[in-house]
Image (cartoon, rainbow, N blue to C red):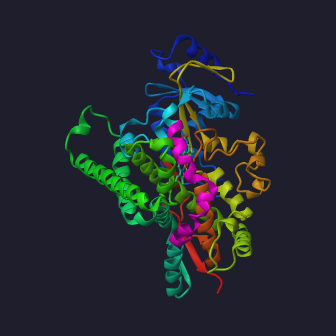
Amino acid sequence: HLAWRPYAVARAFARQGVRGRPYRFFVGNSGEVKAMRAAASGQTLDRSSHDITPRVLPHLRAWTSLYGKVFLWWSGSTPMLCVGNYDMVKRVLSDKAGLYMKPDPGPAMMALLGRGLIFTEGEDWVRHRSVVHPAFAMDKLKLMTGAMEACAGEVIRALEARAAASASGEATVEVGHQFTELTADVISHTAFGSSYRQGKEVFLAQRELQHIAFASFNRVRVPGLKYIPTKSNVRRWQLELTVRGTLMAIINERIAAAKEAREYGTDLLGLMLEANSGDGGQSVMSMDEIIDECKTFFFAGHDTTAHLLTWAMFLLGTHPEWQQRLREEVLRECGGAGTPLHADALNKLKLVTMVLYETLRLYGAVNITVRQATADVNLCGVQVPKGTALSIPFAMLHRDEEVWGRDAGEFNPFRFQNGVGRAAALPNALMSFSLGPRSCIGQDFAMLEAKATLALILRRFAFEVGPEYKHAPADLLTLQPQHGLPVVLKLVGP
Ligand code: HEM
């Protein structure tokens, strides 16, 4: 059932090889993409339609309507196959034979994250995943609920004070910023426990490095420039030293303490070190690899979760009936304000979970992912030559009416009432955390943190989206409201 109009083009492409084909064979090129993105970046969308694709994937949306869900285009020197078909996506993401790999992340991302879980492949990936995976088991995450609640509680108290101090009992808050700071605190506490302050230093340095890396994305790459002591390079080197030095100190301190205590601790670092001390005292990962995994936690687990919370506030702020339902559920399962949160109670919040899934479907932090064919492969009948990049547009797949039904563009958390696997015509239709072996290792962590934070907010505040809000979702590596999300909070309860 592929809508495969340019199939003839693809076949010619496959027969005659990748390089050296004239550009006119292809549907679009990177120049067009830039122009479409620039045009889209000025638009504000209708906030009730929830179709963000004209803004975040304008090129794929335009070409999909012309050529179908699967088509070929050319990005710079790379042929790109848009894979908007579920069977194909599933095949690519479930691959265990190494037929599809992540493309080269480029020097900026490598400098930022090194060879952490996100960028390893093959046997290295299996080794890394075996060490990191145990830290994210649900029984371990449950022990982190206290730290999550403590961090969110601090933010809530500051907001309560602001609302209480105003004559109207209301406070207008830019929640995106609040959640970014909150998730940074949570990851610093849950990753590093008592070394939290040093962890926060690493985090701040890492965040500045991220800005430097992204600023360099759109610049022309001049060979050798990275070795020249420009102002930004010098700052980058200083920050890299801070990150590495501080992480190394935290890890060495922990290893030394474990000799006495005979355990590494129950934070993410401790659990990872525990799994790293393999049989016979032989470490599975080197110090450098552990450092890269710590950097990866910050990078992968921070903005993503902050945006999940921000978009959930947007949807609840524009759907007061759902907000009230969720508040009632939280009060029923978790008790009123002041009652400590328990992971088991949070896991019973069915309506909150449904709303979070629906938020992830409509406004998932990751809109698109890319894989590269490592060999000539037959992908559901399409000959894909080695080297072709496959772009998997989650944001479009999540709005596919054939899979999600006629109301795919609407906010309807009820679709998840029988579980995430039964929400659509196909079982793995929700791909916000990706699918298969490379799916998100931190998904339970993110959901638990989001549930704890929402529970605390719903118990204390009723809220609506501020009138000045402009609906302009932007893909700045992760999907976020371009102009922030002002929310008017009003105290509720005693
Ligand atoms: C709402 C929050 C989150 C979303 C939407 C999200 C989404 C994703 C997606 C789509 C991928 C796959 C990327 C790809 O293959 O191209 C991924 C991978 C990953 N995520 Fe998350 N993530 C979230 C939270 C977290 C958290 C909290 C952590 C850790 C603290 C984390 C750690 C990772 C890691 C390490 C990978 C790489 C896994 C591997 O390749 O084996 N993520 N995430």
Q: From what the image shows, is residue 487 above or below residue 476?
A: below
Q: Which residues are magenta?
A: 126-152
From the top left corner, tell me how far across and down residue 201 is, in percent: 35, 61
Q: Nearer the viewer, residue 355 or 49?
A: 355
From the top left corner, tell me how far across and down residue 349 is, in percent: 71, 65
- Does residue 475 show up? no
Quadrant in the rendering for residue 286: top left
Where, quadrant-wise, is the N terminus in this rendering? top right
Residue at (43%, 36%) from the top-left corner? 105
Q: From what the image shows, is residue 448 above or below residue 337?
A: above
Magenta stretch, overall SS: helix
Residue at (28%, 50%) from the top-left corner? 241
Q: Nearer the viewer, residue 405 or 448?
A: 448
Quadrant in the rendering for residue 7: top right
For the view shown, which residue lies furthest in the left direction? 229
Q: Is residue 424 magenta?
A: no
Where, quadrant-wise, is the C terminus in this rendering? bottom right
Q: From what the image shows, is residue 159 above or below residue 96?
A: below
